[in-house]
Amino acid sequence: MKEFEFYKDTTQDMVVDLEGIKMNMEFDNKKAIKKKSRLNRVAAAVVIGVLSVGSVGVCAYAIHKWNGGILDKYQVASEDTVKHEQTGLAQFPDENGETQSVTIDGVTISATQTIVDNYYAFVSLTVDGFEVGDGEQPGFSRIECTLDGEMVSSSSYFYDGTIDDGSGRAIMADGSEIPCDENGTLISSYMREDGTMEYHILLYTDGTKGYFIDKTLHVELTDLGVYGAKEDVQVAKEGTWAFDWKLAGERSFKTVKLDEALGETGVVVTECEVSPISLRVVMDISDMSEKYSLEESNVPHLSGVKLKDGTLLTCITGGGSEFINNKNQCEIIFSIDRMIDVDEVESFLFVKKSWSEGEKCSIDNFYDVSIVE
């Protein structure tokens, strides 16, 4: 089966207790799908600098500052940051409060924060000592990630300060429109006020619950530069910035067995599972009116969730992995762009009818599948 793809500053010091959590549950038929990322390029390179960042474990009274891009991406309220550290969802490679770093040719890259649940791991790094001008897009020639020595699928990008507005349209994190040049081309803003940039890596599950928790992650970033006209990185700084640390994470989840038809599509939802930054669904596709296509994923798209207070979190699904357990069953695991309290989710939302760009969607646009028992 081939790989394919799915669609798609506030900081705070805090004092918390941290704990590591272990899980190891297995299930079959594993095949990863990557979210589209024009910034994930591959090239040959030589490893020059290696850093052992240290293990994440129990460490009391650590002082941490959240990366602004993580606060933006997951739209985390400042009052919730301590809670997410205490559960283990948010972790920091160095438990002493000092950012672990590798410096090569005047560029310092620091592994600063991770968000890990049962199925996905999100890594944020800070890049200092390299600037890009207007219209330039930074990137690495090669990125490689391994988990306990085994290759793991990933997508990655430099954070440009944009988020989704909840209807599928990109806006700036402060709610303003993305600026344009005189030709109407969107202007990306990679440089932060302090002169640094933020690099994000999303690591993909193999379908195993607790896949990342308590395992050692190795990350290599090679040859930094900007993209040229042929979408190749024009290298400005040669070298490999490499990091190793042990991941923790949060194990909370809720799973509900169902028998819920999605209208007249012939698709029946048989299982829904929610974790803090991922959604999993199993569907019976044996009665679909048209033949199921793995490449097109022509089942109603999982868009998000409805909370018990009535809040709709839509267009929050990002990179995903899909597993065909047999000819009649499809299992999909999405990463999401929110941090969710699993006990506050009332239902899963599958797209029933589309909406125009910029138009706010409503509950009428979705098949509303309750997971309240």
Image (cartoon, rainbow, N blue to C red):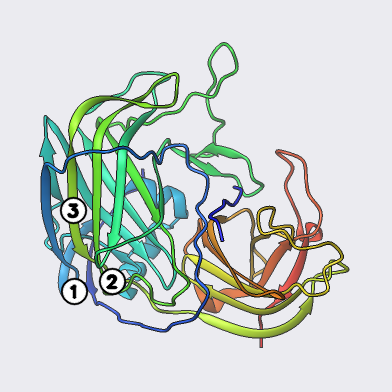
Residue at 52 percent of width and 75 percent of height: 342
Secondary element at image label 3? strand
Is residue 25 in view?
yes
Hey, which residue is sitting farthest top in the picture?
182
For mark 1, what is the residue? Answer: 57
Residue 198 as seen in the image, left or right of residue 238: right
The type of residue carrying mark 2 is Ala
The answer to whether the residues at label 1 and label 2 have Cβ atoms under 8 Å apart is yes
Residue at 85 percent of width and 69 percent of height: 263
Precedes in sequence: disc 1 or disc 2: 1
| Image quadrant in which you'd find residue 129 | top left
Circle 1 packing at 10 Å, graded few (<14), some (14-19), many (20+), is some
Residue 243: assigned label: 3
Residue 308: assigned label: none
In space, the residues marked 1 and 2 are separated at their CA atoms by: 7 Å
Residue 248: assigned label: 2
Secondary element at image label 2? loop
Q: Nearer the viewer, residue 270 or 288?
A: 288
Precedes in sequence: disc 3 or disc 2: 3
